[in-house]
Image (cartoon, helix red, strand yellow):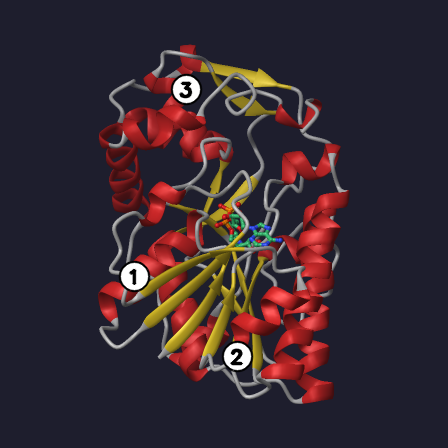
Amino acid sequence: MDLLVTGGLGFIGSNFILHTLREYPEAVVTNVDDTRYGSNPRNLEGLPADRYTLVKGDIADLGIMSRLVKGKDAVVNFAAETHVDRSLSNPGSFLQSNVLGVFNLLEALREENPKARLVHVSTDEVYGDAVEGSFTERGALRPSSPYSASKASSDMFVLAYARTYGLPAMVTRCTNNYGPRQFPEKLIPKTILRASLSLKVPIYGQGTNIRDWIYVLDHCRAVKRVLEAGEKGHIYNVSAGDEKTNLEVVGEILRIMGKGGGQDLLEFVEDRPGHDLRYSLDSSKIRDELGWEPLQSFKDGMVETVKWYQENEIWWRPLIDDKVLSPTPWRLTW
Ligand SMILES: NC(=O)c1ccc[n+]([C@@H]2O[C@H](COP(=O)([O-])OP(=O)(O)OC[C@H]3O[C@@H](n4cnc5c(N)ncnc54)[C@H](O)[C@@H]3O)[C@@H](O)[C@H]2O)c1
């Protein structure tokens, strides 16, 4: 399979490429990434040149995308501005990358390769707060942040192109991922790194916001399954059903790191504006129709994750500064 991956230098994209090259010996991957903050060339160092090519480029550039989609069997779109905190202070770049970028990717496919399968990787955040119960794929979209609004818009474009132009395109909506190679600004790596550096661990508000966590490789396996067998124009929710408050997640990490309950390490800070209280997805469609299920438990996945950061200081040390590890990043200018 000749595959084009966008945003493959980032957290999930790089894990997806490593997983694909490892598990599918016939796969050849081209990765287009314009090396923004979430990206890290170290994520994919040393891959064989006959199976992996990196192209530096913006998915919003129609010329580049038209050239890259030609002849590909399939495209997986991970490229996006993803840091919700940054979307509060700089929403314009989210519109440019996440909406215009996806639009141009779709235009390139429509013009140059309308038979290529496309998986557009989206997020549970498009549904907004789940006050009670869990969203199915039929849930209304009520995004709360500029990030989630931009992802919801791009989902709509993908579904419209599947229907109007017949592109074999699918949308996956996954819950919060954790695992190796996540940029240190996000909750889990930030907690591990601040605790390793004996800094206080910030908790937004009361720490009662609930997220449903999934190990990154389980998400990658779900994307691959949808790429192989998903139905054109369909949405697939992806979740492991591991709902936890932020306080529980931080507590688990500190326990794994041998910091006891860690109460004295916690610092409660002002909550982020528009912070959704709870996300929760019903993922029975992908489980029942495509036979996918998560393999990693939260506890084991978190042990793996902590271990990875402890063993890979060479990876994270150059990425951290006061801004990246800030307790209240949404207050900063990005
Ligand atoms: N991280 C999560 O928990 C999560 C959960 C559900 C869905 N998602 C979705 O998965 C995808 C990947 O997320 P991630 O956490 O790996 O993000 P990330 O920020 O780690 O990586 C994003 C990558 O996309 C690249 N990129 C951004 N804009 C680009 C553009 N215009 N052209 C080319 N490359 C561009 C960046 O350079 C970076 O390498 C995103 O679409 C995100 O919405 C993430």
312 vs 282, nearest the viewer = 312
Mark 2 close to ligand 1, CB under 8 Å: no
Instruction: Measuring from the top left, give residue 170's x and y in whole percent.
Output: 56, 76
The disc at residue 46 is: none
The residue to which callout 3 is attached is 194
59 vs 306, nearest the viewer = 59
Foreground tag (3 vs 2): 2
Q: Give the alpha-carbon distance from disc 2 to disc 1, as whole Å.
A: 24 Å
Regarding residue 294, the answer to whether it shows in the image is yes
Q: Which of marks 2 and 1 is nearer the N terminus?
A: 1
Question: 270 left or right of 5?
Answer: right
The residue to which callout 2 is attached is 70
Which amino acid lies under the numbered mark 3 shown in the image of this protein?
Arg
Against 193, residue 170 (above or below) is below
Mark 2 touches mark 1? (CB < 8 Å) = no
Question: 190 left or right of 101?
Answer: left
Against 93, residue 219 (above or below) is below
Which amino acid lies under the numbered mark 1 shown in the image of this protein?
His
Q: In which quarter of the image is residue 300?
A: top left
Q: Quadrant of residue 122?
A: bottom right
Instruction: Measuring from the top left, give residue 299's x and y in whole percent.
Output: 29, 43
The disc at residue 19 is: 1
Instruction: Measuring from the top left, give residue 41's x and y in whole percent.
Output: 39, 44
